[in-house]
Amino acid sequence: MLKRFAKTDDGAVTAHDTIADIANFAGRGGHGPATPEPKGIERRQFRTIWISDVHLGTKGCNAELLIDFLDHTDSETIYLVGDIIDGWRLKKKFYWPPEHNDIVWRIMKRARRGTRVVYIPGNHDEMFRQFTGLNFGGVEIRRAAFHDTADGRRLMVLHGDEFDTVMLAHRWLAFVGDAAYHVMMRLNGWVATVRQMLGLPYWSISKAAKHKVKNAVEFIGRYEEVVARAAAQRGVDGVVCGHIHTAEHRTFAFHGDDIEYWNDGDWVEGCNALVEHADGRMEILDWPAEMAKRATEEASVESAEGSSKELADAA
């Protein structure tokens, strides 16, 4: 799959064959994933799930964590809020391990069984924006979307690069920053490997550094306010976006109206998802923390079962 992801003469990535490959891949019912879906797992049910900034096609993508998330959750609707596939990196060097196929397979399977899947391309997968309004393999391609929550709020959903001043005014600088960012992602990978060998949970050095750097914090704050203001101008109750790899929920007041800002994070640094419960309540999930909690609970159950067996044997 994606074998025909190629450059045109002007250096742009062509998307037609890539979309066709994905649609064909979705229909290959007899071909399962390299990482099989676990059996007998009770999935957590949500009304809606938002994920973004997966960056398939890069080594920074935390595919194993996202596969675990998809295997343990389900929803009526899932929004893919941009930068799912990283066309910028694939132009430079093709990288597509089996785990990345497994993520696509799981998403396509959801579409086939009736989950509404809405894909809103971002700046890294902007080659798919030319297909806005079309449907491939049950996946709707949209430039932006509006979502009505169960409790009556109307939310604007978009990737968010439209409000990034660097992207708008200095696109060349965005590419330079992307190269530097991927150096940091390689460092993230080394740290994650060492921590895994030591039996420690996932931790992102780049995420920690970003929260410590004053300029990054100021940029994030300005970005959040600009996006929320745009939502207010469109007369909605809030906005869901991605792009800056920082999961967050804030409320801004504009002309007496409260506007909710939600960022669903990413699957490179924080490994977050935004979910809506059946009653309309929304929550940002920190999946590494969820996995650690689950492991602790399973260890407790195994310990209790072991103690019960020992008592039974002694009797």
Image (cartoon, rainbow, N blue to C red):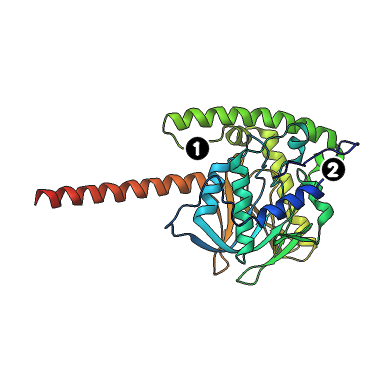
Furthest residue to the front?
A: 30
Place of residue 83 in the rendered image (x, y in percent of width and height, measured from the top left):
71, 46
Q: Nearer the viewer, mark 2 or mark 1?
A: 1
The residue under label 1 is: 202
Please name the amino acid that badge 1 sits on.
Tyr
Q: Nearer the viewer, residue 192 or 156?
A: 192
Q: Nearer the viewer, residue 210 or 80?
A: 80
Instruction: Tell me the residue at 65%/32% (across/down).
Output: 213
Residue 168 is labelled as 2
User: Can I make out residue 162 in this image?
Assistant: no
Place of residue 128 in the rendered image (x, y in percent of width and height, measured from the top left):
79, 50
Q: Quadrant of the N terminus?
A: top right
- Give the left or right position of residue 51, taking residue 176 as reference: left
Residue 7 occupies quadrant: top right
Please name the amino acid that badge 2 sits on.
Leu
Mark 2 vs mark 1, CA separation in Å: 34 Å
Residue 310 is labelled as none
Place of residue 243 in the rendered image (x, y in percent of width and height, measured from the top left):
71, 46
Instruction: Tell me the residue at 77%/37% (across/down).
Output: 88
Tell me the crowding category of disc 1: few under 14, some 14 to 19, or many 20 or more residues within 10 angstroms, Cα based: many
- Dot 2 or dot 1, earlier in sequence: 2
Tell me the crowding category of disc 2: few under 14, some 14 to 19, or many 20 or more residues within 10 angstroms, Cα based: few
